[in-house]
Amino acid sequence: MTHPDPRLSINQATLKRASLAEALQATVDAGVQAIGLWREPVQEVGLATAARMLADSGLRFSTHCRGGFFTLPEGPERRAALDDNRRAIDEAATLAAAGATGSQAVLVLVAGGIPDGSRDLAGARERVRDAIGELAPDAAAAGVTLAIEPLHPMYVSDRAVVSTLGQALDIAADFDPGVVGVTVDTFHVWWDPDVLAQIARAGRERRIATYQVCDWKTPLAADVLLSRHYPGEGVIDFAPLTRAVLDTGYDRDIEVEIFNEDVWSTEPLRAVQLAVRAFGALVSPQLHSR
Amino acid sequence: MTHPDPRLSINQATLKRASLAEALQATVDAGVQAIGLWREPVQEVGLATAARMLADSGLRFSTHCRGGFFTLPEGPERRAALDDNRRAIDEAATLAAAGATGSQAVLVLVAGGIPDGSRDLAGARERVRDAIGELAPDAAAAGVTLAIEPLHPMYVSDRAVVSTLGQALDIAADFDPGVVGVTVDTFHVWWDPDVLAQIARAGRERRIATYQVCDWKTPLAADVLLSRHYPGEGVIDFAPLTRAVLDTGYDRDIEVEIFNEDVWSTEPLRAVQLAVRAFGALVSPQLHSR
């Protein structure tokens, strides 16, 4: 078996069907040192219990997934979304404090799509900026970095109106880099003709809060949300993207995050082991050839 | 029934199951003045016959679809692809000459995806530029404009490595604007945070060879190629995009091009009438409020 890379983190979405306890156990059993958690399984056991379980696992905490979904116009629903993001900020801070040394207080933000019945993409994008402006003081007070995640443009209408790394950086530019950064996820950005330049820019602007890897393969799954694959199974060349991220000085954990029915049907320890192997083959060589 | 807009052109892909004769007839019967043709149904009857049929229809010819698919590395298959593009250039010239006054000799180019077994997206993109360099003299000699079409980034791996209007313009920049231009298709570019600026740039650089409209709706069809809809059925706001195109001085026909199983199952005349109505409601107001 491949020895797990010390910088690999398993994003809990890769183990969607597992409980928090099972996800932590599979990650530890595989010898992986870090995990990124999702809000729903954390809330299932309660934040205090989740923090204790994380501490007991000895794992580092790499990200909390996820806040955002704040493209609605002003009104009670927007207020509720912002309040929920404040709870997510608190969760991220609590979990980062409970994780092993090297844990990161990072909350990944998925913007949300165009509200039902609207065709105003530009307006939805403006409201993302406004929402982050409202949340930034809370994040700063909690010591949490909000990591705006550009999603692939195929999700622009129903999931994330932030579509490119450049756009995410333009939004982040209004804020302190310790408070608002970006998520670089290979699946979402690999196609962009400008991606290497934007990764370099993200580094110059000290914005890369987390780096996530998974692969792209066609035909896309019928539900395009579930089209993510282990590195090596698709067509993404991880070498130039990973080198570009590392060249910025990025020294945090690197997450494997896969939404895929086949992966979710795999026994959790086996899924982590496959992620370990794929990461070792496709990402580690870039980390250790420097 | 809505009176058809004089600038509406029906792209034959909207009537995929119709023969050339049926497509021409449905377009004429609906009172539409222009049509964009596809190579396969033209070749089915032979170019000379197709040109005569087009002339007899009295329709303008707006585009020929499509050339491209030239991302393969050097070798017999690449040579065959380039030769096939030269035939497509000749077809476009012949059909434009046969169409009514105002016909355009435009060949739409879809770049092609990453070759099987390769992960070299950057290399595939370079080979697109090289291929256009080889074809440009043939296009110039034939009086045909090659219209590079950026396709939505969800098609980047298997269909078109040209993913944004900016990227298409960067490629076109090496060539005469009369010989190499771009296709602006709402479905492919609407998500781009930079789209309005890039349309303006395309105008300044005199590159807009054709403008195509159709709508985006989620969930995407299981085959994402077939996710295009009549304007008004989805979430694209056609007003700012169309105004941006017109503001460049664009004065050619505007095509409705829809790949969609439901549209293809519609009787051709009915499909054209639905395109007429959608165009009249969503696009025409921008054309006539100026």
Image (tube, coloured by chain):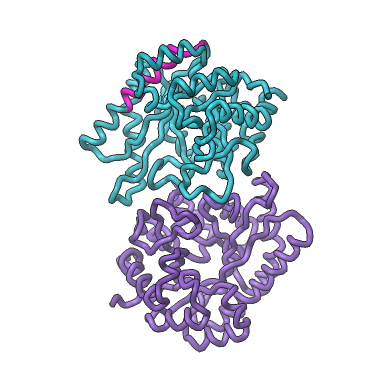
Chain colours: A cyan, B purple
Task: Point out residue A20 in the picture as x, y percentages from the top left corner.
Answer: 43, 22
Task: Point out residue B261 in the picture as x, y percentages from the top left corner.
Answer: 45, 65
User: Is-magenta flag for residue B65?
Assistant: no
Range covered by the magenta-colored residues: A85-100
Please tell me whether residue B51 is drawn above or below residue A206 in the rendered image. below
| Residue at figure coordinates x 40%, y 51% from the top left | B219
Please tell me whether residue B57 is drawn above or below residue B93 in the rendered image. below
Residue in the foreground of this view, choosing between A169 and A103? A103
Residue in the foreground of this view, choosing between B28 and A216? A216
Task: Point out residue A34 in the picture as x, y percentages from the top left corner.
Answer: 53, 19
| Residue at figure coordinates x 55%, y 23% from the top left | A9
Task: Evaluate whether residue B200 shows in this view.
Answer: no
Residue in the foreground of this view, choosing between B157 and B189? B157
Please tell me whether residue B153 is drawn above or below residue B137 in the rendered image. above
Q: So how many labels did they put on this image?
A: 0
Task: Point out residue A27 in the picture as x, y percentages from the top left corner.
Answer: 54, 21
